[in-house]
Amino acid sequence: EMQLVESGGGLVQPGGTLRLSCAASGFTFGSYWMSWVRQAPGKGLEWVATIKEDGSEKYYVDSVKGRFTISRDNAKNSLYLQMNSLRAEDTAVYYCVRGGRSWGVWGKGTTVTVSS
Amino acid sequence: DIQMTQSPSSVSASVGDRVTITCRASQGITTWLAWYQQKPGKAPELLIYAVSSLQSGVPSRFSASGSGTDFTLTISSLQPEDFATYYCQQADRFPRTFGQGTNVEIK
């Protein structure tokens, strides 16, 4: 069974840092683009970042450029999102998703709350 | 950026009804248009990819079509498990963008 499991969310103060992880199983992780999508409380879906299979290409939504870094370790079947200089507006459930275009495999999400 | 606008934002319907949701893009899209269903407290699920291709395991009462800037998702006969929020998403270009969502409610 294909599975994505996120971890690393929590409560952090404005300006703080968090590193989200996503453990993939049930498919050949290194053969897929991977992405992060978030959803603020009571709001719609927002794409955050995407990384190519080999990590050579990375794309970000403007609001996180320079603050967030997407990365992957294909040997560990893992995707990461390093989040620096966090803001209140980054508060959301963060989903790890398989693919770079349409997303057929989703994790259950990890909650990030940025608040003092 | 390509802006995606869905209509209606909310629709009340009964079991057995035909429901159509539209999605308009601010610029023309080639083939990379997807539709998702999300139930409260759950991750979204992919229903349709590449404008009209049904994701494996999705019931055939879901269908989609469109081209250019105008796209539609149709539920031919609404079932109790279909009450949810639906999102369109373009994957033609970065940044990937979603519509604001359409909430399908019980009438």
Image (cartoon, coloured by chain):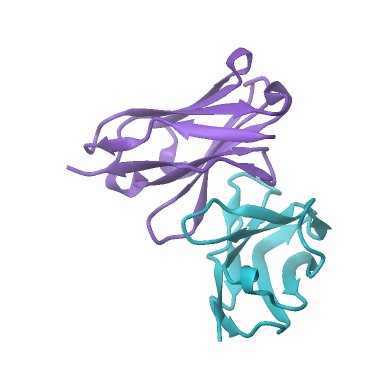
Q: From where the camera sits, is residue B1 visible?
A: no
Seen at 53% across and 33% down, the residue is: A5
Observer-nearest of B26 and A45:
A45
The x and y percentages for residue B90 are 67, 54
Nearest the camera: A21 or A5?
A: A5
Q: Is residue A109 visible?
A: yes
Residue displayed at 53% across by 65% down: B100
Quadrant of the frame with the N terminus of chain A: top right
Left or right: residue B88 compared with residue B74: left
Please state the horizontal and vertical placement of residue B13, each as a whole percent of the image: 61, 84
Give the side of residue A27 with respect to residue B107, left or right.
Answer: right
Question: In which quadrant is the C terminus of chain A drawn?
Answer: top left
User: Looking at the colours in the rendered structure, which chain would you say is drawn in cyan?
Assistant: B
Spot occupied by residue B92 in the image (x, y as percentages of width and height): 71, 49
Query: Residue A93's x, y, as percent?
Result: 42, 46
- From the viewer's perspective, tell me whether residue B34 is left or right of residue A34: right
Which chain, by letter, is purple?
A: A
